[in-house]
Image (spheres, rainbow, N blue to C red):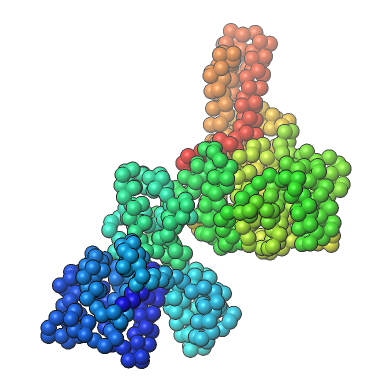
Amino acid sequence: MTVLFLYGPGGVGKSSVLDVLADVAVADGANVVRLDGRHVPPTSGALLGVLAAVLDSGGDPLRELAELSRPVLLIDTYELLESLDEWVRDTFLPALPGDALVVIAGRRPPEPEWTADPAWRELVRVVSLRNLDTRDGRAYLVAQNVPETLHERLLAVSHGHPLTLSMLVDGVRRRMAAGGDAADAVPRGLGDLPDLVRVLLKRTIDEIPGPWHRMALELCAHAYVTSEELLRAVLGDSGVSAAEAGELFAWLRTLSFVDEGPYGLFPHDLVRDALDADLRWRDPDRYSELHHCVRAHLLARIRSGGDEREKQRLLADAIFVTCSRTSLAVEVATARMVEEFIDELRDGDRAAIVEMTRELQGQDQADLVTYWMQRQPHAFRVFRDARGEPRGYGAYLELHEATEADLATDPGAYAMWRYAQQHGRPRTGEQVMAWRFFLDGTHHHRSSPSVTLAAVWHVLDILTRERVSWSFVGTYTDAELWGPTLAYLDFWRAEDADYEVGGTRYAAFAHDWRRTGVGQWLEVTTAREVGAAARPASEDLSELVLSQPEFVDAVRAALHDLHIPERLARNPLLHSQVLRRESRNGQEPTDALRELLGRAADSLREDRRLHGLYEVVDRTFLRPSTTQERTAEALHLSFSTYRRHRDRAVTHIVEWMWKRELYGQARDVEHQVSTG
């Protein structure tokens, strides 16, 4: 006897394979008997009863099956008969003759006993059915007379899943039969076809035991990998205990479409897309909440420190969570890193990097890479493969440390530095950073693990670096291709910073962190990820970047004009970073400025060295009732002493606000990560 055990997720084609095997067996003169777990109650007696009905037997169906010439037994939907597995293995099948062929098809792989038993090990062949690969998928589409121009989109949406692909092909056929454009029948993603998603989920997923199981499944579909820790962290607020999170994790492991990896569980791509699209369509608020929770958990893990490689992996997971939810970042989302990692530049890498650059971008660019590896070697990172060999690299230059000779040598560095000077000059101590070089040795600027690693490096730097005024990306030559991805990251097109090297034009993108700090950046990018309304990435010149002298003058003016609404409404602080950061949602700008100045004044009472100065500020600016001369008298101070105290208090208020203008970004990130 031979047993062929087929397993795979719903809709992958197990029943179709049984149909083909049945036809082949009948044509070859075999006697085919077919059972389906959907029509057999899971008891041995019921199975024998159904078998008797199939054989039209009036006696012992098992004996009659054994007496058939060349019997072929096909058992479909075996996952519904798993409670009978031991009986089938030890009693039912051993009763069949030696020339019998048995084919079992189910969603889950066979129990270990099938291969652990030496007797069965020689008789059983286990085959995992998965989605069609690209070659087979194209062959199917050709056989179905689908226009070749649609093949790539159909395979991308379906992930090669046979049922999904056949349903999409049916839509194309109907569109073509009606005389319409077949391309209109191909969606951008499963989210555009809720009816198809419903059918796929019904065919793919067994009955879900309860609401927490559904939440766990939705989380598994949304996150790149799901660990028990992630279940505890995200579902804990919904009342799931640590023990229950462990039970949910164990349940996920039993699902046929969920696989295990070194860092946790992950579903098959089609099931992931279907579940995610269904939740997004069915409950947008729940979808947004789940996205925020998963994102916040990953960012908190990243910022908690630890191994650098672990940070890179977690950020790659976060990028998958974010980018795969938007078509804007397709080049990043499609490039999964596995064993590749980011490393520092080593002496042995230099020749490979220069040669890679020369081949793909020309000698002039290679000469500039050599120059900057000498001037700022710490600005370079190497993207290594599993063997540690360089497969790509990038360089994030510190333009604020560049000399005039550096800027004169490199037209790219000069163009981006000049843009910063013309569009918002950096203030003392502020950094100007520029992504000047990026390459993958095989794929150049196209989708590759190096692209994902560069994105990981980029976002890690955004989250951890302080006092950055400008960040530039000036590495790409195809502005149209990379524009949507950079816009998603809130980098606007900065054409004035474009430059040429060796006859090739490089496109520049920019972000001013004083206009949109890291906290706001997290809010904007999160909104884009879940499809919420978010402002476009653009340079808003109405947002002022005040120099320190201008900021000092604006604070002094605001204190004097605190109770003159028409003058306060024109104060430059209304467009400052500190006010945007500190104000509450929906608050009027002038009210927010008054509140902020009040908080700055309150800080005087927290410092014993400034004892008594708060009352001066309170009577002079916050609640003035008379002239300053009479205020001095009321405070029992000479006017010269009063003015000295007043000026000292104002200086403290200015310093308090200036510090938050410059250093508020790190606080923003902590707040965003903690609140999600």
Residue 628 falls in which quadrant of the image? top right
Q: Height in image: 320 above or below 429?
A: below
Q: Nearer the viewer, residue 59 or 182?
A: 59
Q: Is residue 329 visible?
A: no
Side (left or right) of 124 relative to 550: left
Q: Is residue 67 visible?
A: yes
Residue drawn at (66%, 10%), measured in percent from left and top?
641
Q: Going 49% across and 46% down the picture, which residue do you hit? A: 298
Residue lying at 31% horizontally and 88% vertically, measured from the top left = 30
Q: Position of residue 254 (x, y in %)?
A: 34, 59
Q: Quadrant of residue 98?
A: bottom left
Q: Is residue 319 left or right of residue 291?
A: right
Classify the position of the N terminus by image quarter: bottom left
Q: Position of residue 432 (x, y in %)?
A: 73, 42
Taking depth in this image into account, of 125 and 260 the one nearest to the observer is 125
Identity of the residue furthest to the left in this view: 58
Left or right: 479, with 270 as reference point:
right
Give residue 83's position: percent from left, percent from top. Answer: 23, 64
- Residue 128 against residue 233 in the figure, above or below: below
Number of marks present in the image shown: 0
Up the image or down, 202 lies above or below 483; here it is below
